[in-house]
Image: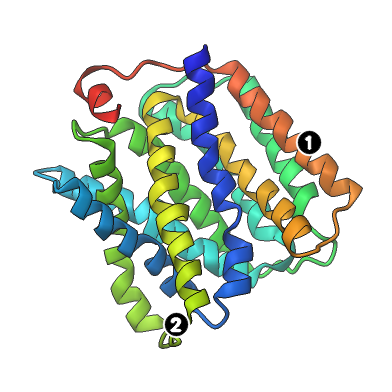
Amino acid sequence: MKSNTRNVLLTAIAPVVWGTTYAITTEFLPGYAPITVAMLRALPAGLLMLLLARQLPTGIWWLRVFVLGALNFSIFLSTLFIATYRLPGGVAATVGAVQPLLVVFLAYALLGTPIRALAIGAALLGVAGVALLVLTPGAALDPVGIVAALVGAVAMAFGTVLSRRWRPPVPLVAYTAWQLAAGGLLLVPVALLFDPPMPVPTLANLLALAWLGLIGMALTYLLWLRGITRLEPSIVSPLLLLSPVTAVVVGWVALGQALTPWQVTGALLVVASIWLGQRYAAPRPVAGAAADAAR
């Protein structure tokens, strides 16, 4: 039980750090296009980790790594930034909060994990909490932004479940590096074709990109993937709801944004949703070589 709690707490660090993305991007990366920022988050961190890991995929793992890189980074990060730019008022976060619900059904289809009413109830409670936390009455329902947010949620849900199903017998650093590098490489031609030229970076820009890439991607995704290899996806996925909670807290503390009673209520509902998500599912031990590799 103590080991399970430790795994949950370490995994939760990832979405908490990801919750700083909005403030860092808006304050320190003005004028940067969404796909370019997504590419700069994933590719440099992935290449640096590849140098440390000194190991490349073999055989079928080349295909699997690019599939996971596309789901977890190329598609998810691109649609995340597109939705954020097109959906003011927190609609993007609210739409993205359906991901834990998607994971419940995907884990059943791909991993055979049973569907429990408590898991569905916890996921719906999380959506309601995020809506109260970040949704404003005047939020614009841009169709492109809504589709982007849904696509991002579906991509990350598939990536979470498939990362649990596909576990290569290699160190976790190598597995993380493969996905980051693959996801970043896939974004390079898209950024070159569709994004305007990147502004000349200032020192503040470089520090922001270093935080988003090295801390906000390399380190945090290492923790996230570690959690996926040790815990059920339906336990891990609700932790993503900590990201909008962190974003609101950072906006309140660092940017002087107001915090309303409804937002406090929403944050409490999110915490209750995560607690329920941890209560209903017991972790399955990771067997074989993959477990040794993950340690």
Q: Is residue 191 left or right of residue 87?
A: left
Label 2 vs label 1: CA separation?
A: 39 Å
Question: Residue visible at 45% across and 46% down?
Answer: 220
Residue 284 horizontal/vertical position (percent): 40, 16
Task: Write down the quadrant of residue 136 in the picture.
Answer: bottom right
Residue 28 vs residue 104, the one in the foreground: 28
Task: Write down the quadrant of residue 98 in the picture.
Answer: top right
Q: Which element type, helix, strand or loop, lies under badge 1?
A: helix
- How many numbered marks are there? 2
Q: Which mark is residue 268?
A: 1
Question: Residue visible at 57% across and 42% down?
Answer: 240
Q: Is residue 182 left or right of residue 113?
A: left
Q: Is residue 52 left or right of residue 3?
A: left
Residue 40 horizontal/vertical position (percent): 39, 68
Q: Judge the density around disc 2: few (<14), some (14-19), many (≥20) Cα neighbours within 10 Å.
A: few
Residue marked by disc 2: 201
Residue 9 vs residue 262, the one in the foreground: 9
Residue 204 horizontal/vertical position (percent): 52, 75
> Do we see residue 126 in this rendering?
yes
Q: Which mark is residue 89?
A: none
> Do we see residue 101 in this rendering?
no
Q: Which element type, helix, strand or loop, lies under badge 2?
A: loop
Applied colour scheme: rainbow
Question: Residue visible at 33% across and 68% down?
Answer: 187
The answer to whether the residues at label 2 and label 1 have Cβ atoms under 8 Å apart is no
Q: Earlier in the sequence, mark 2 or mark 1?
A: 2
Type of amino acid under label 1: Leu
